[in-house]
Image (tube, rainbow, N blue to C red):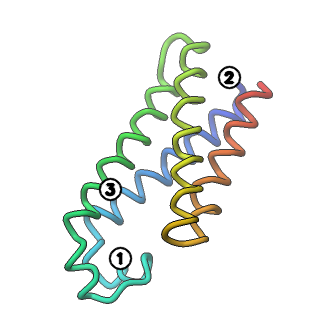
Amino acid sequence: MSLLAQILIALVALIHLYIVYLEMVLWDTPRGHKAFAMTPQQAQNSKVLAANQGVYNGFLAAGLIWALTHPVVAFGAQIATFFLVCVAIAGVYGAMSAARKIIYIQTLPATLALTALWLS
């Protein structure tokens, strides 16, 4: 796995850790309202769902971190491929169902990481 692939995979993991923080901690705050374009009432009504979403994003980050730290590099690359594809698909779905900007926040970084991984 090339250094570029590792850096991009780590970046995708960090993005998802930040999303976890937004969804589980900041959801019902002004920062969360702004990030997700919601009113305080919308945030309050969806707080439990957002926390659940945060758990799933945490699993994506954990899988990418596992891929980066696995002692067998070839297996780590397979793990990374799986989780990056999951992130890319989730990003496409999110862009279609929630907000177009998700394609840039999730799908694009995951696709770049996958490309770097496959070229290494």
Quarter of the image for the C terminus: give it: top right
Amino acid type, residue under disc 2 in the picture: Met
User: Residues under labels 2 and 1: Cα distance?
Assistant: 35 Å
Decide: marks 2, 1 in contact (CB < 8 A)? Answer: no
Amino acid type, residue under disc 1 in the picture: Gly
Indicate the secondary structure of the residue bearing disc 2: loop
Quarter of the image for the N terminus: give it: top right
Q: Residue sitting at 54 percent across and 20 percent down? A: 76
Please state which of the two labelled residues, at mark 2 or mark 1, is closer to the viewer.
1
User: Residues under labels 3 and 1: Cα distance?
Assistant: 14 Å
Q: Quadrant of residue 19?
A: bottom left
Residue that carries the numbered disc 1 in the rendered image? 32
Name the mark on residue 53: 3
Indicate the secondary structure of the residue bearing disc 1: helix
Residue that carries the numbered disc 2 in the rendered image? 1
Please state which of the two labelled residues, at mark 2 or mark 3, is closer to the viewer.
3
Measuring from the top left, give residue 39's x and y in whole percent: 32, 89
Question: In the depicted view, which residue is nearer to us: 52 or 4?
Answer: 52
Q: Residue sitting at 42 percent across and 76 percent down? A: 36
Question: In the depicted view, which residue is nearer to us: 104 or 15?
Answer: 104
User: Residues under labels 2 and 3: Cα distance?
Assistant: 30 Å
Please state which of the two labelled residues, at mark 3 or mark 1, is closer to the viewer.
3
11 relative to 79, above or below:
below
Would you say 116 lies left or right of 49 here?
right
Q: Residue sitting at 49 percent across and 34 percent down? A: 64
Decide: marks 2, 3 in contact (CB < 8 A)? Answer: no
Mark earlier in primary sequence (2, 3): 2
